[in-house]
Each structure stands twice: as C-alpha cells, then as structure tokens.
Image (tube, helix red, strand yellow):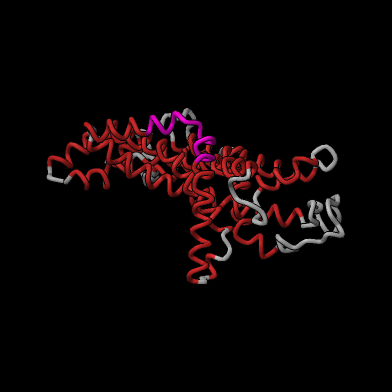
Amino acid sequence: MSDAVAEAGIEFAETQPLKVRSLWGDALRKLVSNRLSVIGIVITTLLIFTAIFGPTLAPYGYTEQNLLRPAELPSADHWLGTDELGRDLFTRIIYGARTAVLVAVFSTTLSVILGVLIGTLAGYAGKWVDALVIRFTDIIMSIPSLLLAAMIAATLKQPVIQWARNVYAQTHWSVFANTTWLDLVIVFGGLSFVAWPVYARLIRGQILSLREKEYVEAARAVGVTGRGIALRYLLPNGLGPIIVYMTFSLSGAMVLESSLSFLGIGVMPPQASWGNMISSNIGSWSYRPWLVAVPAATLAIVTLGINFLGDGLNDALNPRSSKAI
C-alpha cells in the first residue's frame, strides 16, 4: 500500500505537535510587541526600582540642608541643583518617587479590594442590594475626585494628628511622636474612598454579563453555591478590565497625591513629595524655574509611562483587539 502511494507521488507531511497557547501567553506577546507599552514597562520598572533601592543610592539625606548653598544650579556635586534650603534636589526627587509609589500602590490596592468585593456582591446578589450600591456609587462619582479627596483630607487631618499627639502624651510611644506617616495614611484613605466606586461598577458589569453564561448555568446545575460561583467562575473571568483600569489608577493616584500636597493638605514637608516640592517653589518660578520644572517633569514622565503601559495592557487583554499574534 505504501509503495503504491509512493508511486502515485502522494506525500504526507510529518505530524507536528499542536502549539499550546494560553490567554496570558498571548497577552504577554502582544504587550511586548507594542513599542509604547515597552517604553511604559521601562519607565514603570525604573520608578519601582527607584522607590525600593533609590534611597540607599541617594548621595545625600532627603532632609540634609546646606544653607550656604541654596537654590544652586545643577553641578557635579548636585546633579539637579539644590532647593531653597540647600537640599539636594536629585535626592528629594528619589524620595518623592518612594512617596508616589507608596501612595499609588496602597490606595489603589485598598480601592480595588473594596470595589471588587462590593461590586461582586451587587452583581450577583441583585435586586435591592444592586440598586443600593449603584445609587451610592452614583453619589460618590458625581463629586469631582480632587474636591472629594481634598475634603476628606482637610476634614480628617487635624483631628487625627491631635489624636496621635494625645496618645503620645499618655503613652510616650515613639511611633506617635512623628506624625508625618499619618499624612500618608490620610491620603491612602481619601484616595481609596474616591476610587473604589469605579471598580465596583466595573466588576458588577462583568458579573452581570457572565452570570448567564453556559458554564455558570452548569455550575448551578451541579449544586455549586452562589458564593462558589462568584469566587470560582465570575470573579476570575471578570478581572481583565480591572487589571487595565488599575494600571491607569496608579498614575491617577500619583497625580491626586501631588495635587493634595500642592494644596497643603497631603504629604507635608519635610517628607519629600513631588507635589509639595512644586508648591514650595512655585513663588520663585520666574527666577528659579528648575525647582518647579524638575519635579513637574518627573511626574509628567512617570504618568505618561504608566499610561503607555495601561494602553498596552488594554490591547493585550482585549479579545476584540484587531492585532493578531
């Protein structure tokens, strides 16, 4: 039989093993093939590296002053110059990166956890629970984010600091002696409260579209509980848009933190923040422009890089993307 086939000139190709592809593997290939997203990955990686290891490599302490050399131009000793108190601007930019990353990561994580839990409950429970959650999120989202975050920070700042001082007076615990860390906590809370409704609505919309799928109906038919369906099937399959929006939220949280610090109700000096660095030197913009331009440009570059990464993730995780792998 084989000889007859060979004589007839029929050739069979060797069987090739099927190439196994996965959703996350395809997404990664699509992400790294996008030049702008690669730029975003590089900028985001440098930001995280600076936040973690930068302070150990900084040439000076972030509160170290040299009043004999205030507001100097960039030089070999001070690569980006010095500020109005003679502090090294490069060092404070590094510590400002740590503040920005801390605020962005913690506030975004808190808002994601809160929003996903409430959105999952609203989407699967339905009826009056869903209506109540949607009305509450509508109220919060109708208020401008900066205004609401500023109102929360301004309302809580003095009572919380006074409470910490009273605790220190009674207990002499050193953790309450310096209240600068409370600035971060208040900013975390304010930004988280502002951002969670978006995540709640996103995950609710995903669950409403997924809960009638065949595999969910099959899970109900075999007796899987509502909680099990939500945690095992609905929530994991609805995380794509959450991951994308979470990336954009990181840059948004950095901008909001800088705005609050600029207004004097966020992270306060001597703690380094790009926002309070701009605020401290905005009055000298006309004759010391680098003191404002350097932190402002740093914030702009970081925000742009994270947004590039977010756009790349959106294309990579979007099943309707027109680009093929």
Residue 160 percent across, percent down from the top left: 49, 54
Residue under the point 35% across and 36% down: 7
Return the residue nearer the eye: 120 or 32: 120
Q: Is residue 37 visible?
A: yes
Residue under the point 43% across and 31% down: 141
Please state if 25 lies on the left or on the right of 215 as rendered: right
Residue under the point 72% across and 57% down: 91
Is 203 a magenta residue? no
Image quarter (top left, top right, bottom left or bottom right) of the N terminus: top left
Please state if 250 lies on the left or on the right of 109 as rendered: right
The rendered magenta stretch, by its main secondary structure, is classed as: helix
Return the residue nearer the eye: 155 or 286: 155
Q: Is residue 311 visible?
A: no
Is 145 a magenta residue? yes
Counting the numbered discs, the total is 0
Asked which quadrant contains residue 308, the reply is: top right
Residue 134 percent across, percent down from the top left: 33, 31
Residue 84 percent across, percent down from the top left: 80, 51
- Residue 55's place in the image compared with 232, above or below, is below
Return the residue nearer the eye: 88 or 144: 144
Residue 196 percent across, percent down from the top left: 41, 40
Residue under the point 64% across and 56% down: 271
- Residue 67's place in the image compared with 227, above or below, is below
Q: Range of the magenta residues?
A: 137-151
- Residue 268's place in the image compared with 246, above or below, is below
Please state if 46 lies on the left or on the right of 323 as rendered: right
